[in-house]
Structure formats: structure tokens, C-alpha cells
């Protein structure tokens, strides 16, 4: 049976884009404690100026703060929750502390001292994972290069397991590659079903190319897949 999946744009599961964004920020530049989770946004312009006002009106930090504030209100909080605190003097940092975000992180298998991409995070919906990658790159990513010579988006991470988990996750390049491969295989299968003579011709050509006494040996050898970040 063939099914048409060309309109598929993601996968089902639990978790919202807002929740994913918050967890991405937490993993990238946050602190997870037993009593709360703390998000930190850093930038040189986040300084106390005059009457405890922060100067960040047109900075990238402002975009992260606004996105985090829009996401955090989707979680249950006490009525006195005020969001981001005033800038920390001379540190260029603003913090947001949340028990609800702590609970979300705990439910996803994270814990103090184990702030990493867990199997539970990878099982969330595509909406969650898209938000998660955005938050992670907002916290730890940067744009390198120049437009005339080429631009790349890089993730500043020293933990190999985290890098492998991000590379193996639901990034758009992986989804596009999956869809191209699936479409190619499906169109090939449809051609074979519509023209059975293709199978006979292909088998004849294969046997001719292999020759007599052919024994199959994998080019990569007999070994386990090299992606071992779950060890």
C-alpha cells in the first residue's frame, strides 16, 4: 500500500512551541535548581541606567526577552509572578525565575546537574522541537561570516553528546532530506508498479554488473552505527 505523505510538515506528540522555546533557553543559558529554573539573557547593553531602567530597546536581547515573556505566560504561575527581574548591576544580565518551568524541565527528564537533551525532549511534538531549537540557538547560537562570502549559523557547545543530539534532531535540513529521499523512493516504487518489466531489466543489469561469484561486503564494515551520544 502506498500513502501520500507529501503534505506532512511535522510529527505529532505533546508539548507546545512556547514550552520548547523555554526549555531551549534553559538548556542554553539557564540554571536548573530544585526550587526553580532561572533563565538568563546576557548583553552588554543590559545595564542599570538612571532609575533602574534597562537600555536594550533595539538589541537582540530585547527580542529574546519578549519571546521568553510571551512563552512563559503560557505556563501556570502565581498571581504575583512578574517575569524578568531588573538588570543585575554591571553584569549585563536579566533573569527570570520560574517554578513552572522547573516542573516542565523535571517532567522532561532534566534535573540539577543533568541539564541536557533527554530522550523525553526528543519524543515531543515537532512544534515543541522547533521552539526548542529556536530557544537553544537564541541562547548559544551566533551568525558567522559575511553575506558576500557566506554566512553560517553556529552553536557554541563543547559537549559532544549535545551537539550530536541537536544534529540528529528535527532540524529543517534533516526534514527536507528525509522528504526528498521518501519522494524519490516512492516515485521509484510507483514506476515499478506501473511497469513491472523494469524489475526484470534492473535485476538483469545488477547481475551483469556484479559478475559471477559475487559476495556482498559492507563498505563501512561490520560495526555499530557511529552515533553514540546516548551512551
Image: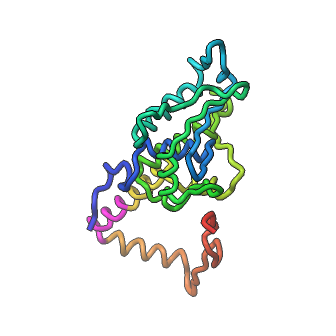
**Quadrant in which the N terminus appears:** bottom left
Which corner quadrant holds the C terminus?
bottom right
- The x and y percentages for residue 76 are 40, 43
Q: Which residue is found at the position 45% from the left and 59% from the top?
A: 123
Residue at x 48%, y 31% (from the top left corner): 82
Residue at 28% x, 66% y is 195
Residue 55 visible (yes or no): no
Q: Is residue 33 above or below residue 220?
A: above
Is 196 situated left or right of 107 in this image? left
Determine whether 14 is above or below 207 in the image: above
Q: Is residue 195 magenta?
A: yes
Res 230 → quadrant: bottom right
> Where's residue 117, x and y in %?
57, 55
**Residue 7 at what x, y percent from top left?**
31, 49
Q: Is residue 194 left or right of residue 92?
A: left
Magenta residues, as a range? Answer: 186-196
**52 w.r.t. 100: above or below:** above
According to the image, what is the colour scheme of the structure? Answer: rainbow
| Picture quadrant where residue 197 is located | bottom left
Identify which residue, 11 or 110, lies in the foreground.
Answer: 110
Of all residues, the one furthest to the bottom in this rendering is: 213
| Nearest to the observer: residue 18 or residue 7 | 18
Magenta highlight: main SS: helix
Q: Residue at x 61, y 36 (%)?
A: 40
Number of numbered discs:
0
Please state which of residues 117 and 224 is positioned toward the viewer in this rendering.
117
Q: Is residue 51 visible?
A: yes
Q: Is residue 27 magenta?
A: no
Amino acid at each position: 500500500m502506498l500513502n501520500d505523505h507529501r503534505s506532512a510538515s511535522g510529527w505529532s506528540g505533546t508539548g507546545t512551541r512556547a514550552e520548547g522555546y523555554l526549555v531551549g533557553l534553559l538548556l542554553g543559558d539557564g540554571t536548573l535548581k530544585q526550587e526553580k529554573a532561572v533563565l538568563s539573557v546576557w548583553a552588554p547593553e543590559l545595564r542599570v541606567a538612571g532609575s533602574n531602567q534597562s537600555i536594550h530597546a533595539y538589541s537582540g536581547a530585547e527580542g529574546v526577552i519578549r519571546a521568553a515573556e510571551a512563552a512563559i505566560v503560557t505556563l501556570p504561575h502565581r498571581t504575583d509572578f512578574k517575569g524578568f527581574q531588573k538588570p543585575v548591576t554591571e553584569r549585563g544580565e536579566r533573569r527570570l525565575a520560574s517554578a513552572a518551568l522547573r516542573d516542565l524541565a523535571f517532567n522532561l527528564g532534566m534535573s540539577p546537574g543533568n541539564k541536557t537533551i533527554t530522550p523525553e525532549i526528543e519524543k515531543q511534538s515537532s512544534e515543541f522541537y522547533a521552539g526548542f531549537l529556536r530557544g537553544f540557538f537564541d541562547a548559544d547560537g551566533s551568525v558567522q561570516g559575511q553575506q558576500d562570502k557566506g554566512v553560517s549559523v553556529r552553536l557554541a557547545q563543547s559537549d559532544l553528546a549535545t551537539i550530536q543530539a541537536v544534529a540528529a534532531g528535527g532540524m529543517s535540513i534533516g526534514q527536507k532530506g528525509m522528504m526528498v529521499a521518501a519522494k524519490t523512493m516512492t516515485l521509484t516504487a510507483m514506476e515499478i508498479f506501473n511497469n513491472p518489466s523494469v524489475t526484470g531489466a534492473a535485476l538483469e543489469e545488477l547481475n551483469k554488473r556484479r559478475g559471477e561469484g559475487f559476495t556482498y561486503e559492507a563498505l563501512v564494515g561490520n560495526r555499530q552505527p557511529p552515533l553514540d551520544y546516548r551512551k
